[in-house]
Amino acid sequence: MAHKKAAGSAKNLRDSKPKYRWVKVFGGQPAVAGNIIIRQKGDKYECGEGTYKGRDFSIHASQDGIVSFRKKNFKKFDGRTYLKTVVEVKQS
């Protein structure tokens, strides 16, 4: 006969909090200066005209305007080229 009540194990109940990354303001939508346009880990998206990059790689609008995305070729140091998406905020 058991001397203690049975207790369930709680070893697998921990989980990390979500980071809520990726695009917050899409192309064609208006952005106010200081708005976060993209939250990202690393440099998946590049800053263009009217944007700046925060300490955690998030891209912010530096001026009021309309958000737009475009593709651009970038060159690595060994000569390889690759496409990256550039985020811009243009005044309307």
Image (cartoon, grey):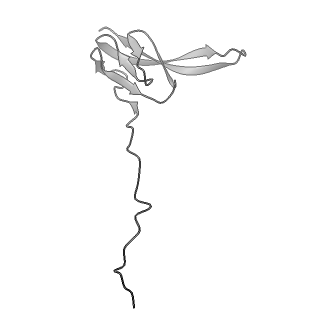
Q: Residue furthest bottom?
A: 1
Residue at 59% across, 15% down = 73
> Percent from the top left, x then y, of residue 65?
30, 12
Quadrant in which residue 8 is drawn: bottom left
Q: Residue furthest front?
A: 3
Quadrant in which residue 19 is drawn: top left
User: Which quarter shows the N terminus?
Assistant: bottom left
Q: How many marks?
A: 0
Side (left or right) of 52 relative to 34: right
Q: Residue furthest right?
A: 78
User: Which quarter shows the C terminus?
Assistant: top left
> Percent from the top left, x then y, of residue 30?
28, 19
Residue at 34% across, 11% down = 62
58 lies above or below 8:
above
4 lies above or below 75:
below
Residue at 35% across, 81% down = 4
> Percent from the top left, x then y, of residue 18?
38, 42
Residue at 40% across, 34% down = 21
Side (left or right) of 78 relative to 39: right
In the foreground, 54 or 49 = 54
> Percent from the top left, x then y, of residue 86?
48, 17
Quadrant in which residue 56 is drawn: top left
Side (left or right) of 34 relative to 88: left
